[in-house]
Amino acid sequence: METLREFLLARIGEDEALAQRAIDAHSAQHRWTEGDLPDGRHFAHWDPWRVLSGCVAKRLIIAAHRDVGPGLDRRADPDRALKAHACSTCGQYDEFAIAWPCYTLRVLALDWVEHPDYRHEWRPQRLSSGVGRA
């Protein structure tokens, strides 16, 4: 079974490969501009170099929010306090283990919610802080 982390890294790899193919298909001096194409503004905005930069940023977020194994959430009821998988970043400063995959990774995955390998259980849930309310 694929984890959310594996799913994200696979999608990022696909985006990187597509952007790199676009870069490789042009000369080193090529610039993506609005030009005369009807979709030119879109292509200029989603310049392959920008896509690659976004992929690096997503990889850094994933690296910061890794599964560190069991963790204890001191706010939870004793029967639900032990999390089998905890996020390395979320809750680390207040000693409240946050279940992994965390909200951050779940939100990151929304870019690919229509992908056939996306799983409904990865959807972000509303947080008690109010984050995630529509």
Image (cartoon, grey):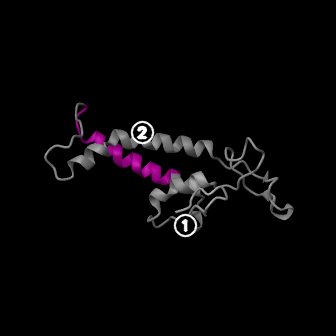
Q: Which mark is residue 100?
A: none
The residue lying at 31 percent from left, 42 percent from top is 47
On the image, the x and y values in percent for residue 25 come to 25, 42
Q: Secondary structure at mark 2?
A: helix
The answer to which image quadrant residue 20 occupies is: top left
Q: Which residues are magenta?
A: 9-28
How dense is the environment of label 2, judged by Cα within 10 Å: few (below 14), some, or many (20 and up)? few
Which residue is drawn at the image coordinates 23% and 31% (left, top)? 29
The N terminus - image quarter: bottom right
**Distance between mark 1 and mark 2 Cα atoms:** 26 Å
Q: Position of residue 15 (x, y in %)?
A: 40, 50
Residue 45 drawn at (x, y percent): 30, 44
Q: Residue lying at the far top in this picture: please name it.
A: 29
Residue sitting nearer the eye, 109 or 128: 128
Label annotation for residue 53: 2
Residue farthest right in this picture: 78
- Which residue does the image show at 24% across and 40% down from the upper left? 32
Q: Main secondary structure of the magenta part?
A: helix
Q: Is residue 93 left or right of residue 54?
A: right
Q: Which residue is the site of mark 1?
A: 119
Residue 25 painted magenta: yes
Q: Quadrant of residue 81?
A: bottom right
- Label 1 Cα neighbours within 10 Å, binned few <14 / some 14-19 / many ≥20: some
Q: Looking at numbered disc 1 in the image, what kind of residue is underneath it?
A: Arg
In percent of width and height, residue 123 lies at: 56, 63
Whether residue 6 is situated above or below residue 46 in the rendered picture:
below
